[in-house]
Image (cartoon, helix red, strand yellow):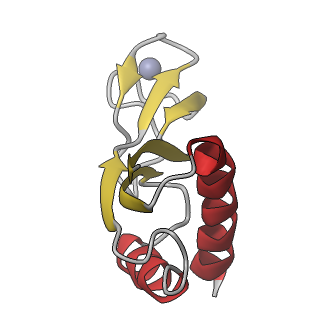
C-alpha cells in the first residue's frame, strides 16, 4: 500500500523533528494532503493508525487538511480550480495551464508533550 510507505517516511520526519526535545509523546500531527497528491485520506489515516503503535506517536491524533487544486492558465494568466474531469481553463478554454497547489503532501504541525 502506497499510503503505508508515505506514513513510514512521515514518521521519520516526525522523529527527526522532535528528537532534540526528547518528548514524552507526540500528541497531534497535522498533515496537508493535496487533492491531486494521489493519496486517499481514509487510507492515509488507517496507515497512520497502524504505524503509530509502539512509537512516540502511539496516542497521537492525526488531522488531515485536504488542499484543493489550484491552477494558473498560461494563456489568460487567471487562477482557477480545475474540476476533476475538466482539462481546460474555465475563463478562456485554453488547455495550457499549470498546477500551483494540490499535489503535495505537507507535514504542517507536530504537537508534543515534554
Ligand atoms: Zn485561461
Residue drawn at (69%, 64%), measured in percent from left and top?
9
Residue 17 vertical position relative to residue 44 in the rendered view, above or below: above
Instruction: Let me know if residue 11 appears in the view.
Output: yes
Residue drawn at (45%, 61%), measured in percent from left and top?
24
User: Where is residue 65 shown, x and y percent of the image?
Assistant: 31, 51
Tell whether 50 sits left or right of 90: right
Residue drawn at (61%, 60%), measured in percent from left and top?
10
Residue drawn at (33%, 52%), measured in percent from left and top?
66
Instruction: Let me know if residue 103 appears in the view.
Output: no
Residue 79, picture quadrant:
top left
* Nearer to me, 2 or 4: 4
Residue 62, picture quadrant:
bottom left
Residue 78 vertical position relative to residue 104 in the rendered view, above or below: above
Residue 94 vertical position relative to residue 109 in the rendered view, above or below: above
Residue 56 vertical position relative to residue 83 in the rendered view, above or below: below
Residue extending furthest top? 77
* Nearer to me, 69 or 75: 69
* Nearer to me, 102 or 14: 14
User: Where is residue 105 shown, x and y percent of the image?
Assistant: 54, 50
Amino acid at each position: 500500500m502506497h499510503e503505508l510507505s508515505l506514513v513510514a517516511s512521515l514518521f521519520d520526519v516526525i522523529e527527526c523533528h522532535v528528537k532534540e526535545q526528547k518528548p514524552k509523546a507526540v500528541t497531534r500531527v497535522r498533515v496537508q494532503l493535496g487533492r491531486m497528491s494521489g493519496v486517499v485520506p481514509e487510507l492515509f489515516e488507517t496507515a497512520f493508525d497502524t504505524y503509530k503503535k509502539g512509537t512516540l506517536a502511539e496516542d497521537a491524533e492525526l488531522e488531515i487538511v485536504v488542499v484543493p487544486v489550484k491552477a494558473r492558465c498560461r494563456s489568460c494568466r487567471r487562477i482557477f480550480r480545475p474540476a476533476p474531469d475538466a482539462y481546460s481553463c474555465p475563463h478562456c478554454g485554453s488547455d495550457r495551464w499549470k498546477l500551483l497547489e494540490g499535489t503535495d503532501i505537507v507535514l504542517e504541525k507536530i504537537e508534543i508533550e515534554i
